[in-house]
Amino acid sequence: MALRVFEAFAGIGAQATALERLGADIEIVGISEWMVDAVICYDAIHHFGEEAMKVPPYEEQMEYLSQYEFSRDSVRKTNLKLIEPEVIERLYIANRRSKNFGSISQLKGDLMPKCDLLIYSFPCQDLSTGGNGRGMKKGSGTRSSLLWEIERLLKELRELDKLPRYLLMENVKAVLCDAFKDDLRAFLEFLESIGYQNDAPMILNALDFGIPQDRVRAFIVSELGEHLITVSESINHGKQEREFDAMQFLRLDYDREVLRNEANIAQLNATASRLRMWEINGKEANRDTIIRTITCNMDRTHTAALFRYEGALGNTFRRLTIREAFLFMGFTEEEYERTIHLDFTYRRMNKLIGNSIVVNVMTEIFREMFVGRYGITARPNADN
């Protein structure tokens, strides 16, 4: 029987991608995502090449989509009537094919498909320094407090005897810090009260999983019942030596028109603020390059990396291209190219990839959770 998976706060689907990498026998029974661009991009990556869907008239598309809440900026609800008809059509197709239930706040237990694994990567903005530490306290109304929608949902699922066997939480490592420990403890105690056991929190860096990006994230695995998968004890088997060839991730062949065009889009003017960015983030593009954490805005003072580049704006520097950012997040070039036809701006794509999860890290977590089941095998030469 396939592993039935529900992705809450799905983004562009790094979770599904990781399971696909493992050749797992899975069924994505549904996702919850309210950001319009993310829903459309998820569909482009995961349903590429599928048979074209018959699309009903605009009025029927709107009637269907009006069941759900969506956002253009991931902050506030969007009035669907203000969205262009061609985008409505894209959203309609994407929502149908991805079995999307929209905002987590709207999702009800009786409507949610039964699943074996619920993955919840709730918003991190109010836990990170950029969010001014507003936190995730229940009832606070912060984006990070959407964690408590998972509590509500699990309560509803319990009443319906539909609790998932496995849960996986992902967020920034600040979720484990002293400022938020009481809130996290309260949530984990709730899980225990309804029958889950919680593995020890894991703080994992993409640098240990074959990716030259210094990106640290926290993960917690929970399992329903007396048995507990102790991924925290076995995950070290999946770690690799920090020996990278960053040239496998950087695309510097500017004789290729497509790569030069992408580099031109990523180029910055040498303004005073950007020169300051260069002083902080300037790097040589070579095999030993390690970049900072990719964020949802690579035009910030502390960006992932800047490289010297002579392009459309003269001899200045550039950020990562979106193609490179996809690779540094563990996606393949083919998966990136499935999104090109969307014609999203650099900033829109940057937001999507910066809010994603490194596929390599998720792959190893899932391997440790399910090795020997659902078609997932041990890594070659594994000693566990």
Image: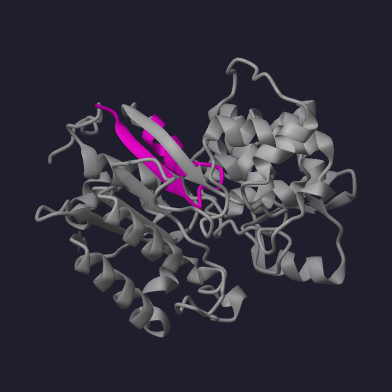
Residue extending farthest top? 51
Q: Residue at x 76, y 71 (%)?
A: 276
What sort of colour scheme is used for the picture?
one colour
**Residue 12 on the magenta segment:** yes
Q: Residue at x 41, y 35 (%)?
A: 29
Residue 312 in which image quadrant: top right
Q: Residue at x 62, y 49 (%)?
A: 68
**Res 343 seen here:** no
- State the residue in front, 7 or 301: 7
The C terminus appears in which quarter of the rendering? Answer: top left
Q: Position of residue 170 (x, y in %)?
A: 40, 58
Q: Position of residue 119 (x, y in %)?
A: 38, 50
The N terminus appears in which quarter of the rendering? Answer: top left
**Res 226 seen here:** yes
- State the residue in front, 12 or 84: 84
**Residue 313 on the magenta segment:** no
Q: How many marks?
A: 0
- State the residue in front, 138 or 373: 138
**Left or right for 361, reference 250:** left
Q: Position of residue 190 (x, y in %)?
A: 27, 70
**Left or right for 85, reference 108:** right
**Left or right for 382, reference 251:** left
State the extent of the magenta-drawn residues as a range: 1-20
35 relative to 187, above or below: above
Residue 156 in which image quadrant: bottom left
Q: Position of residue 127 (x, y in %)?
A: 50, 74
Residue 372 in which image quadrant: top left
Residue extending farthest right? 313
